């Protein structure tokens, strides 16, 4: 099952309302995406903690509807 880029963006915006988000469909198959997320929510968090926060905001879609997500996270 695939996920649309718009749905990923919506989930991320719900999880990180202040974030600047850039998403790219890497293969054109709705399964392989890259995302750059810049949010103040990442302040003081390790890179692993930041990525865990992102996966949590995707509400279980990572590994099911979403096969691969290359993440870049930055503090705002």
Image (cartoon, rainbow, N blue to C red):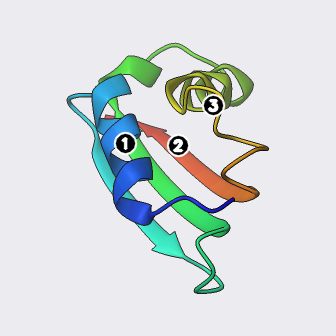
Q: Quadrant of the N terminus?
A: bottom right
Which residue is located at x 58 percent, y 64 percent?
34
Residue sitting at the far front = 1
For residue 13, the mark is: none
Figure quadrant of residue 48: top right
Residue 49 placement, left or right of 30: right
Badge 1 crowding class, 10 Å Cα cut-off, few under 14, some 14 to 19, many 20 or more, is: some
Discs 2, 3 touching: Cβ within 8 Å: no
Spatial distance from mark 3 to mark 1, Cα to Cα? 15 Å
The vertical placement of 45 against 72, above or below, is: above
The vertical placement of 29 against 14, above or below, is: below
Which residue is located at x 47 percent, y 55 percent?
36
Residue nearer the viewer, 3 or 72: 3
Residue 38 placement, left or right of 66: left
Q: Secondary structure at mark 3?
A: helix
Residue 23 placement, left or right of 6: right
Residue hosting label 2:
73
For residue 55, the mark is: 3
Residue hosting label 1:
38
Spot occupied by residue 51 in the image (x, y as percentages of width and height): 65, 32
């Amino acid at each position: 099952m695939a996920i649309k880029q718009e749905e990923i963006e919506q989930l991320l915006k719900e999880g990180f309302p202040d974030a600047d988000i850039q998403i790219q469909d890497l293969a054109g198959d709705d399964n392989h995406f890259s995302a750059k997320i810049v949010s103040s929510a990442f302040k003081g968090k390790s890179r692993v903690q930041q990525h865990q926060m992102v996966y949590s905001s995707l509400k279980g879609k990572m590994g099911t509807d979403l096969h691969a997500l290359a993440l870049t996270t930055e503090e705002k």
